[in-house]
């Protein structure tokens, strides 16, 4: 019974569309953001604005 309820709940949640996922129109600029990241075990702040100065970001 618990398995059936868990499966039902999981399928119900999977069916709800994620509102955070949205496609930008071709040519539209992505909103600026920054986030905490790490490379080689060293933490740093990644900024889209600063990264774009080096070239395109995919």
Image (cartoon, helix red, strand yellow):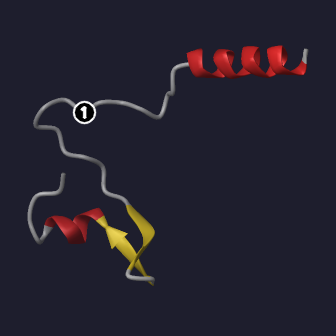
Q: Give the vertical position of 38 relative to 49 (above or below).
A: below
Residue at 43% x, 66% y is 35
Question: Percent position (x, y) of residue 9?
Answer: 75, 19
Residue at (31%, 56%) from the top-left corner? Answer: 32
Q: Quadrant of residue 7?
A: top right
Toward the bottom, the furthest residue is: 42
Q: Could you tell whether 33 is left or right of 50 in the image?
A: right
Badge 1 is on which residue?
Answer: 24
**Position above or below: 41 against 2:** below
Q: Quadrant of the N terminus?
A: top right
Q: Residue at x 24, y 65 (%)?
A: 49
Q: Is residue 9 above or below residue 45?
A: above
For this view, does 23 lie left or right of residue 5?
left
Percent position of residue 42, x then y: 43, 85
**In the image, residue 46 lies at what x, y percent?**
35, 71
Residue 43, given in percent of the width and then of the height, sits at 45, 81
On the image, which quarter does residue 26 sit in?
Answer: top left
Task: Provide the secondary structure element on which disc 1 rests.
Answer: loop
Image vertical order of residue 54 relative to residue 3, above or below = below
Considering every residue shown, the one lying at the far right of the view is: 1
Picture mark count:
1
- Residue drawn at x 36%, y 59% is 33
Position of 44 with respect to 57 (left or right) is right
Taking 36 as reference, is 6 left or right? right
Count neighbours of disc 1 (C-alpha within 10 A) and say few if under 14, some if 14 to 19, many if 20 or more.
Answer: few
**Of residues 34 and 11, the one drawn nearer to the viewer in this rendering:** 11
């Amino acid at each position: 019974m618990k398995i059936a309820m868990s499966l039902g709940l999981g399928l119900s949640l999977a069916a709800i569309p994620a509102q955070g996922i949205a496609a930008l129109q071709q040519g539209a600029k992505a909103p600026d953001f920054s986030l905490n990241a790490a490379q080689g075990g060293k933490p740093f702040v990644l900024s889209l604005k600063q990264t774009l100065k080096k070239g395109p970001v995919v």
